[in-house]
Amino acid sequence: MSDEFIPVARTPDIGPGSIKEVAVHGRHVGLTNVGQTYYAFDASCPVDGTNLARDGLLKGDVITCPADEAAFDVTTGDRVDGGHEALQRYAIKVEENEVKIGPPLGE
């Protein structure tokens, strides 16, 4: 996978509490704005594959899968409801109002 940071959105396009699905590095990625900080994560729920970017329910910094009710902290990727699966997160850069997604974190 590339270490390149790919521009995917302008900051005004991702308002607080919103989620946008983007394609980057050959993956579908969810991009969200929580507390004026941007986070990117694999769009697929690691439990059942539901597209969290389209169907997930974001409340604060927790996104919940509507199919299996798995809940994840988008700021850390950790599951917050007792499960062991985690969301794969991606590096983010914001330069001149442009949000760029980089390589997966932790790899």
Image (cartoon, grey):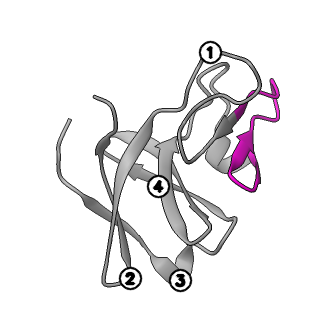
Q: Which residue is mark 3?
A: 12
Q: Position of residue 27 (x, y in %)?
A: 40, 39
Q: Residues within 10 Å of mark 2 (few under 14, many from 20)?
A: few
Q: Amino acid at mark 1?
A: His
Q: Secondary structure at mark 2?
A: loop
Q: Nearer the viewer, residue 90 or 67?
A: 90
Is 22 a magenta residue? no
Give the label on residue 84, or none.
1
Query: For residue 46, which quarter of the picture?
Result: top right
Q: What is the span of residues highlighted in magenta in the rendered image?
A: 56-71
Q: Secondary structure at mark 4?
A: strand
Q: Is 105 placed above or below 67 here?
A: below
Q: Which residue is mark 2?
A: 97
Q: Of tags 4 and 1, which is closer to the observer?
A: 1
Q: Of tags 1 and 3, which is closer to the observer?
A: 1
User: Rounded to the nearest whole Å, what is the CA distance between mark 2 and mark 4?
Assistant: 17 Å
- Identify the residue at the far left of this view: 3
- Left or right relative to 92: residue 54: right
User: Rounded to the nearest whole Å, what is the CA distance between mark 3 and mark 4?
Assistant: 15 Å
Q: Secondary structure at mark 1?
A: loop
Q: Amino acid at mark 3?
A: Pro
User: Rounded to the nearest whole Å, what is the CA distance between mark 1 and mark 2?
Assistant: 35 Å
Give the label on residue 5, or none.
none
Labels 2 and 4: the sequence-earlier one: 4
Q: Which residue is mark 4?
A: 22
